[in-house]
Image (cartoon, rainbow, N blue to C red):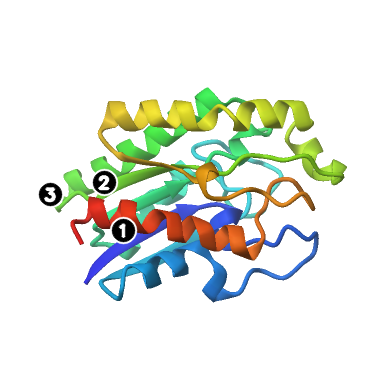
Amino acid sequence: MKTILAYGDSLTFGSNPQPGGPRHAYEDRWPTVLEQGLGGKVRVIAEGLGGRTTAFDDWTADADRNGARILPTLLASHAPLDLVIIMLGTNDLKPAVNGNALTASYGMRRLVQIVRGHFTMLNEPVPEVLLVAPPLVCATENSDMMGHFGGLDHALLQAGELAQHYARRAQEWNTGFFDASTVAQPDPRDGIHLDAANTRAIGEGLVPVVKSMLSL
């Protein structure tokens, strides 16, 4: 059986857009939906952490949110892997973290380098990599959430540029690419997170892409 690592932030974790709401049910999280859509031929390991960035420190959190620092440990603990799906970048847009979609794409590039370097160093098969641009941001009355992202105008502008930058990095590094904003939209309750239906939609949208990449 093939194995996929789904590496992401709160959207992979299954955070509820309702402030203080419960985590989405296991069956509604996109890694679960993807695994089901692959018909039992693949195991999908979900590694989602709220606030995780591509490669930047966030000193406001107790957990280590720097995706580049944590990824090597997860690659080692879950090996061997056939595919690593990376959906990060939304949290990079916070001005206190990075604030820029282009630089977020450089963080994604660094994660590709980490995946390939890790397994090459061990002389083990190198998994495929799929870069996923996260869904966009939408208008919300949740001023605290938008405050994290430098206000709605900044968040809308930068989130809207993620896909184009990620597509270029994918082409440069010969990885797969998927734009999650083509299948999922954020919930206006906080402008960032997804309801259960849109969370499931990402898993459903990834099924044909993953089947092609893994020749299933």
- Percent x, y of residue 137: 67, 40
Amino acid type for the residue under numbered disc 3? Asn
In the image, 136 versus 97, the foreground residue is: 136
Instruction: Tell me the quarter of the picture where residue 28 sits.
Output: bottom right
Q: Badge 3 is on which residue?
A: 123
Counting residues from the N terminus, which is met first, the one under dot 3 or under dot 1? Answer: 1
Amino acid type for the residue under numbered disc 2? His
Q: Is residue 204 above or below residue 176?
A: below
Q: Badge 2 is on which residue?
A: 118
Q: Badge 1 is on which residue?
A: 76
Q: Residue at x 46, y 33 (%)?
A: 107
Q: Residues within 10 Å of mark 2 (few under 14, many from 20)?
A: some
Q: Residues within 10 Å of mark 1 (few under 14, many from 20)?
A: few
* Quarter the N terminus occupies: bottom left
Q: Residue at x 32, y 68 (%)?
A: 38
CA gap, disc 3 and disc 1: 13 Å
Instruction: Tell me the quarter of the picture where residue 63 sits.
Output: bottom right
* Quarter the C terminus occupies: bottom left
